[in-house]
Image: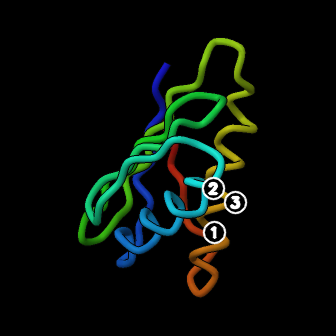
Amino acid sequence: MTLTAHVPTPNASRYLQQLCKHWSHKFETDFDTEKGVIGFPMGPIRMAAQSDALVVTIEPKEDADVERFKMVVAEHLDRFAFREAPLTFDWQ
């Protein structure tokens, strides 16, 4: 299963980098200004920065609590986006 959310924000690159740096102390990460991957225990998190949105894709493992996974990602991004939080996540 793969879930993707297009999160409207003009600060996609900044939030992508902040989240990757934040979790790089605990998990394997690979990122630049346009894309990032976090080796999260519940499954990989992939992000791509666009000019007007952050595209977030999660790939929950079979035993992952999908709703919790979505919530953890959204809550962490909202912390970095406190000036415009809560961000809108349209998971599909």
Residue 73 placement (x, y as % from top left): 62, 50
Q: Nearer the viewer, residue 91 or 64?
A: 64
Estimate the spatial distance between the alpha carbons at disc 1 and disc 2, rounded to whole Å.
Answer: 6 Å
Residue 67 placement (x, y as % from top left): 72, 35
Identified at 59% across, 43% down, the residue is 27
- Image quadrant in which you'd find residue 19: bottom right
Callout 3: helix, strand or loop?
A: helix
Tag 2: amino acid: Ala
Question: Are discs 1 and 3 less than 8 Å apart at CB?
Answer: yes
Callout 2: helix, strand or loop?
A: helix
Question: Are discs 2 and 3 less than 8 Å apart at CB?
Answer: yes
Q: Which residue is mark 2?
A: 74
Circle number at residue 75: 3
Callout 1: helix, strand or loop?
A: helix
- Label 2 neighbourhood size at 10 Å, few (<14), some (14-19), many (20+)? some
Estimate the spatial distance between the alpha carbons at disc 1 and disc 3, rounded to whole Å.
Answer: 5 Å
**Relative vertical location of residue 82 with respect to residue 67 in this rendering, above or below:** below
Identified at 68% across, 29% down, the residue is 66
Estimate the spatial distance between the alpha carbons at disc 2 and disc 3, rounded to whole Å.
Answer: 4 Å
